Image: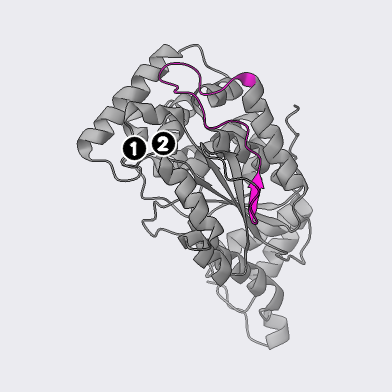
Amino acid sequence: MSIPAIAPTHNDALATLLDNAINNKTKPLGSLGMLETVAKQIGLIQRTREIALEKPAILVFAADHGIVAEGISAYPQDVTWQMVENFLARGAAINVFAQQNGCALHIVDAGVNHDFGPRHGLTDRKLAHGTHNFAVQPAMSADTCASAIAAGMALVAELDGNVVGFGEMGIGNTTAAAALMHKLTGIPVAQCVGAGTGLSAEGISHKQRVIEAAVALHASAAEPLDILATFGGLEIAMMAGAMLMAAKRRKVLLIDGFIVTSALLVAARLQPAILDYCVFAHCSDESGHKKMLDNLGARPLLQLNLRLGEGTGCALALPLLHAAVNFLNQMATFESAQVSEKSE
């Protein structure tokens, strides 16, 4: 497996063209706020002033985690496969929001501890029935981690469209994400750990102790791929690969919440230019996500106190991407509207 090289989107001439187009719209300078930032970002990604969103899709990666044996979740592991069934029955929040906003939805079994058999609407990329318990041993081998990254890259290579949102499902994955966050950013574990699926204060303290003990056990894990294999999940590794390929193919990446951003942390340590392609949908209510976003220098579009996952933030943010594209393409200029432009 080779990690794809990602080119920065920097282009002085195009940036000037986009700035002029945005600033010449019939509005005060900067008055559309982050929509202007997103419109320019999409232009730089697509290397054109004539920007467009085509066939947006959300990939929801599901997998189980051996760390649940340590009692770090308020829900049993069976909820992972039960929620996958809910996705397939179109009964989950992500189904509702994706349909509402005209977004294709792909459910990926990256490593759920359940045998679904051939199912309409389920993309089977299962590499194992979940990870190992990283409180005892690395979550996965280096080879398995590499296979997950490669599988994610292959999925996106087959995907139409130029916008990809990322979601996840996996009981225990906030624990994996918190461990990754700590190892990749150096932020203390206590500031990385949150309630996840609804832990009590005592449960959060227990989760923190489990992660701290695991970090001490695996102190030698230092490089991004080693950290991912040691503490991550199959869905997180597969997402990281999918993100890398999406950026390589100059797609817009819509980043959801805490777990998805942990996958991006890994991808960004491997290829920092990937951040040029990322639109951050929202700031999750999961403790630690804001610090994770700050570490990446990210500005989220929404603040809705979400902490569901599934890619729900991506689906809810998608209309804002359409708004950014539409104002740049359709809004009148001062010249066309014959309105006097006044500097502020």
Residue at left 66%, top 59%?
40
Residue 225: x and y, percent? Answer: 60, 24
Boundaries of the magenta span: 118-142
Residue 135 magenta: yes
- Depth check, front residue: 259 or 335: 259
Cβ atoms at labels 2 and 1 below 8 Å apart: yes
Which is more toward the observer, 291 or 205? 205
Mark 2 to mark 1: distance in Å? Answer: 6 Å
Name the residue that disc number 2 marks.
Answer: 172
Q: Which residue is mark 1?
A: 73
Query: Relative to residue 321, is residue 25 depicted above or below?
Result: below
**Could you tell me the amino acid type at mark 1?**
Ser
- Specify whether residue 16 is painted magenta: no
10 Å crowding of disc 2: few (<14), some (14-19), many (20+)? many
- Quick one: SS at disc 2? loop
Seen at 66% across and 21% down, the residue is: 143
- The vertical placement of 58 against 231, above or below, is below
Query: Where's residue 76, x and y in %?
Result: 36, 40
Left or right of 228, for residue 92: left
Task: Tell me: 56 left or right of 171.
Answer: right
Residue that sits furthest to the left in the current view: 202
Name the side, left or right, on which 260 lies relative to 252.
left
Q: Quadrant of the N terminus?
A: top right
Three-letter amino acid code at the position of disc 2: Gly
